[in-house]
Amino acid sequence: MNPLLDFSGLPRYSEIRPEHVSPAIDQLLADNRALIERLMNVEPTWDAFVAPLEDANEQLSRAWGQVSHLHSVLDSPELREAYNANLPKITQYYAELGQHEGLFRQYKALAAAPEFAGLTPARQKIVDNELRDFRLGGAELPEAEKPRFMKLQEELAALSAKFEENLLDATNAWSKFIEDEAELAGLPDDAKAMFREMAEADSALANMPGWKLNLQAPSFQPVLQYCSNRSLREEMYRAYTTRASEFGPDNLDNTSLITRILELRQEAARMLGFDSYAQVSLEPKMAESPAQVLDFLGELATRAKPYAERDMAELREFAAQELDLPDLQAWDIALASEKLRQARYAFSENEVRQYFQEPKVLAGLFRVIETLYGLAIHPDQAPLWHDDVQFYAINDQAGRLVGQFYLDLHARDSKRGGAWMDDAITRRLTHSGIQTPVAYLNCNFARPVGGKPALLSHDDVITLFHEFGHGLHHLLTRVEDLGVSGISGVEWDAVELPSQFMENFCWEWEVVEHMTAHVDTGAPLPKHLFDKMLAAKNFQAGMQTVRQIEFSLFDMHLHFDLAAGQTALGLLNEIRRQVAVVIPPDYNRFPNNFSHIFAGGYAAGYYSYKWAEVLSADAYSLFEEEAGSHVGGVLNPEVGHRFWSEILAQGGSRPALESFKAFRGREPTIDALLRHNGMA
Ligand SMILES: [Zn+2]
């Protein structure tokens, strides 16, 4: 039997082969399409219509989830081929579902039927979400307008793809060959070694002694941050900030694409009955209106700007006195900041790392979870895809299984970069009882070497806690219906609440103390070193905050109330005059490379980063407030249980704001975020 078609338990990773992929996916797609045809003729009740559709789509997503998981963590030419051969079929299937008029009709009939009032709030929410997504996809447009709407979507997709391609091509179009090592003064040896390798990889330069630079981040960033050659920094800064603009080749200029994308988004929004694209973007989000987002950003800007100005004044003074840079320019900021940081908070990342042994860190993380939620985490058995993977179970106090997770921590050639959480199995009630959830937690930490445990940087530890926050959101849900269980159906601008929340524990002495042991001596991290880390935590937080606000305001105004005749660049310059402390040179063409909003999914959504941070900081502040009255400090099980039942357990079954208020007892405020960033 094809292991991808076995849904009776955990994925059978030791048996799945690339040749299983196409037969399984083809069969599931055919079965699902046949089912959908049958569902057109059933009573539109939950049991007759939604339940079988959910079952069928769950099977497809579990099977494809295993394939795409393997593609991410154990890639091979054969698997990649199977993955790429099936991806278009999957994409096509979901596009069909999103535009299926018969399904839309059945959901509408269910929402209008007397039965609807008797459904649980979670099920009502699932039906409402479906109807909303159909509407935003154009399903309610008059027949005569649908072709135009479809055409807008296609053209927008093509323009976004072109925007990204232009940016990539423009980035790759620039390079520079350096023959005199003195021009690279100040750069770390590993950066220079990389530039030398880049020269050797270039057939035109391979036999010449020298270094090749380009505009990709691993090349651009170290030059701006470390290289004392000011004219090289300026040259690269100019090349970088004018990519895909009128200063380069016409065919790579994104300026007209920006105008066109904004026009088409506005037209699509009007067809759907909205005044602006920003309103369309906010429909499925937690924020209620563009005005609310703008108020939020405005308040944050007012509070952060004095700190940003202070950061900038300190930087100018330091640059003038210590670096002989009295006229600090945009291309000096990263370098001067790095030197100031070193002068102020001298401690070595490498020194810190010696204390964060991976097994000890994991034990410390589990201790936090076990204490807060009264749970027990222990090793468990499952078929695995690699020797390096660990598998654990979580049990409650009564010994009942709550969930399980895979932990795949180390980088390897066959694994994509970064860190992420994914769902393997989602909690739900089935005819045979509760299906317990299973999560994948993936990181790319350095593996153990020389018989010693792997060592993590403090940033790695924060990443691990962050991903575990997403994992707990998935694993500790108490929802019984798939569509809003765990992270499913959670608003985009609230989904980072549980993950950013967990990061806070990495800055608590009572947590860190218990998860450190020097790799040679076994001694815990010294308190004085931890204090230095804390002091450095908020370095230039004011400057960083106003920069995020600048991008967020630009994105929101652009999609909400861009004045007739106003260009994107004109708008950005106006916003910079209001909130920025670093005013870049006139030639800077940031909009032309802002792919988050023109090619990614962040249009009128860039504010989400700060929005979710407010929620997570404010939620955490209840643990801080209650810490004094509890011997365990912030590890307070009473507050922990409340966080579990009001936020983690609820998943997408009710609006995130309701969950937040039920936990915190009030609306969110920005005070905790400002305090955590040293701006109170
Ligand atoms: Zn995250």
Image: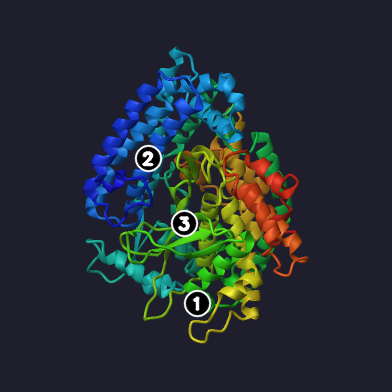
67 to 362, vertically: above or below = above
Left/right placement of residue 176 relative to residue 107 reads: left
Please state the horizontal and vertical placement of residue 491, each as a whole percent of the image. 57, 40
Judging by the rendered image, the residue that carries numbered circle 2 is 59
Judging by the rendered image, the residue that carries numbered circle 3 is 404
Judging by the rendered image, the residue that carries numbered circle 1 is 350
- Tag 3 near tag 2, CB within 8 Å: no
Q: Earlier in the sequence, mark 3 or mark 2?
A: 2
Q: CA distance from mark 1 to mark 3?
A: 33 Å
Furthest residue toward bottom: 521
Left/right placement of residue 355 relative to residue 69 reads: right
Image-quadrant location for residue 33: top left
Residue at 25% across / 55% down in the picture? 76
Left/right placement of residue 573 relative to residue 150 reads: right
How crowded pointer 1 is (Cα within 10 Å; few <14, some 14-19, many 20+) is rated as few
Q: Which label lies toward us, 2 or 1?
A: 2
Please state the horizontal and vertical placement of residue 157, each as a whole percent of the image. 40, 33
Which of 387 and 214 lies nearest the eye of the viewer?
Answer: 387
Q: How is the image coloured?
A: rainbow
How crowded pointer 2 is (Cα within 10 Å; few <14, some 14-19, many 20+) is rated as some
Furthest residue toward right: 629
Give the amino acid type for the residue marked by disc 2 in the picture.
Answer: Gln
